[in-house]
Image (cartoon, coloured by chain):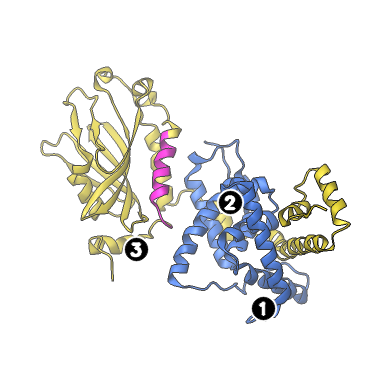
């Protein structure tokens, strides 16, 4: 007689066996009292669970859960992120899209840098080295999530705006922040999204999702905002995956973040 | 990407609450968990693929948040109590207290299980997913789901058969 293992008996109880196999099991059960007891045990445990938990299905769902699903954006951190992402997708120029280089995702701690080249003919292409970005460092050190840090460069032609979106801790205990960074020239704005973690007193960029504009073909000053197309979903998803991988637990609450801003990002204790 | 999942999500809430209670063993924690999962899902709609199952996606989000928070709570040595105040449907007080008591005992027993076993048990035996569906949510092979599930059911049975009085202590 073939001995029936526990998992097969459980699969039989749970209706997971195909009919021929189930019939085989039934035939064997007729001669095996121990197996019949095991089947009964699996039936009892399933029934106990259904009996205990099924009443939950008939309870009214608490109002706060319905509210959480139906809530329009309220300015909470997650909602800000969502709204900003939507805005960002409208800013991707079609011409850059056509070159299949509309979005660059740079991931890493060392070599990542962003070459931001402006399509505005008034400006020379400029390279911004992300990991030596004092304005970003200052913004992330001092600015609460949802607030905008803004500066003009010395000749006031380029504005820089940094909007921290989210603060969290990573698995190594570092504080990390997701941010939106914009370079602004007159009506023109180039937006990128990044995540940076604080280490040895400085914010190190971990990932950056940026428009990579290629100047020569974008020289036409007549390009209108209405020509812009949605972002590539894949890049947005992989950028989020980086954040998800780094993040341990939930984002910090506003009051926790405020305390860190006050203390200069030094842990209490 | 722009599809409105809110009506589907509302319809799922009773199942999500039941699943979360199977994990946390405490009503308030379960509802907190569902709320956090809904907020996370709505903020990551771009990751939702409309041709896949919303329930599996939500279960995965709940699982992820629960594991993260569970680790945090274990580190601080907190013990989670089943909230006595939650409303239970019942036509008379006696029925309600019996239901509450059964749930209380089962939840206390489930707390004795390792979290991977509790996840498999809750997905299959509480929610009723097939082994294959549970394996997809947990991102493990079906055989792994089966061995966790069999061990969980055996242990649960022992706990409920031999120590219901111990498990129910403090209730009433």
User: Quick one: label 2, few (<14), some, or many (20+) residues within 10 Å?
Assistant: many
x 64%, y 49%: residue: B143
Q: Mark 3 lies on which chain?
A: A
- Tell me if residue A70 can be seen: no
N-term mark: 2 or 1: 2
Picture coordinates of residue A107 (x, y %)?
33, 39
* Main secondary structure along the magenta-highlighted residues: helix
| Residue A231, x across and y down, in percent | 41, 31
Residue extent of the magenta highlight: A235-249
* Residue with the mark numbered 2: B59
Residue identifier under label 3: A256
Vertical side of A216 occupied by B13: above or below: below
Chain identifier, colour blue = B
Q: How crowded is mark 1: few (under 14 residues within 10 Å), some or many (20 or more)?
A: some
Picture residue at 24% right of the left edge, 64% below the top:
A263
Spatial distance from mark 2 to mark 3, Cα to Cα? Answer: 28 Å
Q: Is disc 3 on the same chain as disc 1?
A: no
Between A87 and B104, the one lying in front of the other is: B104
For mark 2, name the chain.
B
In this rendering, the label closer to the viewer, 2 or 3: 2
Measured along the vertical axis of the image, is residue B48 above or below residue A25? above
């Amino acid at each position: 007689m073939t001995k029936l293992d526990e998992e097969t008996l459980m699969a039989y109880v749970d209706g997971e066996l195909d009919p021929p196999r189930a019939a085989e099991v039934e035939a064997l059960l007729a001669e095996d009292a121990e197996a019949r007891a095991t089947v009964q045990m699996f039936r009892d445990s399933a029934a106990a669970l259904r009996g205990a938990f099924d009443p939950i299905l008939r309870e009214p769902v608490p109002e706060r859960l319905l509210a959480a699903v139906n809530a329009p954006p309220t300015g909470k951190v997650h909602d800000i992120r969502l709204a900003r992402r939507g805005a960002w997708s409208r800013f991707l120029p079609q011409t850059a899209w056509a070159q299949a280089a509309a979005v660059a995702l740079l991931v890493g701690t060392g070599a990542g840098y962003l070459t931001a080249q402006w399509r505005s003919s008034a400006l020379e292409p400029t390279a911004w080295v992300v990991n030596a970005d004092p304005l970003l460092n200052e913004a992330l050190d001092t600015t609460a999530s949802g607030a905008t840090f803004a500066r003009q460069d010395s000749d006031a032609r380029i504005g820089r705006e940094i909007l921290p979106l989210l603060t969290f801790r990573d698995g190594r205990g570092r504080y990390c922040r997701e941010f939106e960074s914009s370079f602004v020239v007159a009506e023109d704005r180039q937006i990128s999204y990044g995540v940076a973690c604080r280490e040895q007193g400085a914010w190190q960029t971990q990932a950056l999702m940026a428009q990579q504009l290629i100047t020569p073909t974008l020289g036409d000053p007549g390009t209108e905002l209405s020509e812009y197309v949605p972002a590539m979903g894949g890049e947005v998803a992989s950028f989020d995956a980086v954040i998800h991988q780094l993040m341990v637990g939930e984002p910090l609450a506003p009051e926790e973040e405020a305390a860190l801003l006050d203390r200069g990002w030094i842990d209490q204790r | 990407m722009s599809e409105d999942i809110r009506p589907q999500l509302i319809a799922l809430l009773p199942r999500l609450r039941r699943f979360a209670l199977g994990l946390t063993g405490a009503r308030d924690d379960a509802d907190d968990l569902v709320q956090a999962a809904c907020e996370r899902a709505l903020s990551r709609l771009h990751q939702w693929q409309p041709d896949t199952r919303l329930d599996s996606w939500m279960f995965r989000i709940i699982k992820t948040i629960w594991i993260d928070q569970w680790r945090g709570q274990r580190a601080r040595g907190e013990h989670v109590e089943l909230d006595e105040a939650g409303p239970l449907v019942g036509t008379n007080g006696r029925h309600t207290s019996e239901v509450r008591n059964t749930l209380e005992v089962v939840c206390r027993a489930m707390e004795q299980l390792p979290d991977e076993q509790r996840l498999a048990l809750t997905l299959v035996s509480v929610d009723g997913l097939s082994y294959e569906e549970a394996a997809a949510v947990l991102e493990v092979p079906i055989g792994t789901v089966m061995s966790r599930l069999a061990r969980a059911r055996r242990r649960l049975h022992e706990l409920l058969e031999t120590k219901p009085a111990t498990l129910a202590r403090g209730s009433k």
